[in-house]
Amino acid sequence: SRTCFIARAGSPVRPKLVPTMADNASKLQAMQDAVTDAGNDVRALKAEKAEKTAVDGAIAKLKQLKIDLDVEVKAAMAAGDEALQAKENFRTKMAGALEQRLFYMPSFKIYGGVAGFYDYGPPGCAVKSNLQAYWRQHFVLNEQMLEVECPAVTPEVVLAASGHVERFTDLMVNDVVTKECYRADHLVEENLAAILADPMLSPEKRLHLEDMRARLEEFTPEQMGAAIVELGLKAPGTKN
């Protein structure tokens, strides 16, 4: 368990134990084992031709254990969804606050903006200057390296030689009905995050999906298509 400290007005700080994902997984596994054992008991009683009352009691116990397990699994998955949503809400609020305070803003915003281009405001310029000064302090002064400054624009021949032109492409998929387009890697990544939040996921399946998520940016169109089929992805909203 992870220890958190929660302060209450007028009282000393006392530690509060918060269950971790590992704790929840252990609890769910114990409940699953109990369901398995109860199922074995029912089968054994039936094989022994035990009295109906004994069999009925074992069946009732098994049903209740299954209900309890289902409730805990749904609660664990809901907690995982809430954590992901809270993380996304925080990211959105932080990005909005930084833009409102002019740390940065999309370049050419009044003309619709261009993806990947940003302008630094006064606070952003100060942060950038501090980072550059720290970089120079470490690498140039301490490590005695030499600093060079190169153009921000790169010729296509260089990007082709590095593989960016051939491989670094945003693969798109579209809704078969509405024709709305989505980035394939984003759809796969979002669904992988939801699946991996399931505490009952087997270790082998979790390892496979985590490996898929780690290599997602390197997928060819064929590999991306195979991942979409494997995960059974549908268009968000319409489920087409």
Image (cartoon, rainbow, N blue to C red):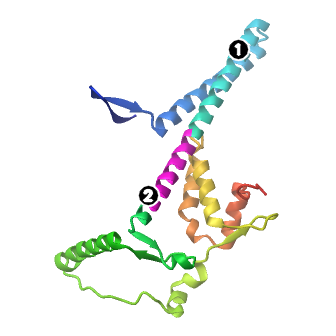
Name the residue tied to disc 2: 94
What residue sits 74% from the left and 57% below the top? Answer: 234
Q: Secondary structure at mark 1?
A: helix
Q: Earlier in the sequence, mark 1 or mark 2?
A: 1
Task: Give the residues drawn in magenta, as a range.
Answer: 79-96
Q: Is there CB contact under 8 Å for labels 1 and 2?
A: no
| Quadrant including the C terminus | bottom right
Q: What x and y, as percent, mark residue 132?
A: 28, 76
The part of the image, by quadrant, that contains residue 98 is bottom left
Q: Where 25 falls versus 35 (above or below)?
A: below
Q: Is residue 75 left or right of residue 2?
A: right
Q: Residues within 10 Å of mark 2 (few under 14, many from 20)?
A: few
| Image spot of residue 153 (x, y percent) | 46, 89
Residue 198 counted in the magenta span: no
Q: Residues within 10 Å of mark 1 (few under 14, many from 20)?
A: some
Which quadrant, please, contains the N terminus? Answer: top left
**Residue 58, disc:** 1
Asked where in the image residue 239 lies, by quadrant, the reply is: bottom right
Amino acid identity at mark 2: Met
63 or 108, nearer to the observer: 108
| Magenta: main secondary structure | helix
Query: In front: 222, or 45?
Result: 222
Rounded to the nearest angstrom, the CA distance separating label 1 from label 2 is 54 Å
Q: Position of residue 104 (x, y in %)?
A: 41, 70
At 69% from the left edge and 55% from the top edge, which residue is drawn? 231
| Of 224 and 122, the residue lying toward us | 122
Q: Is residue 89 magenta?
A: yes
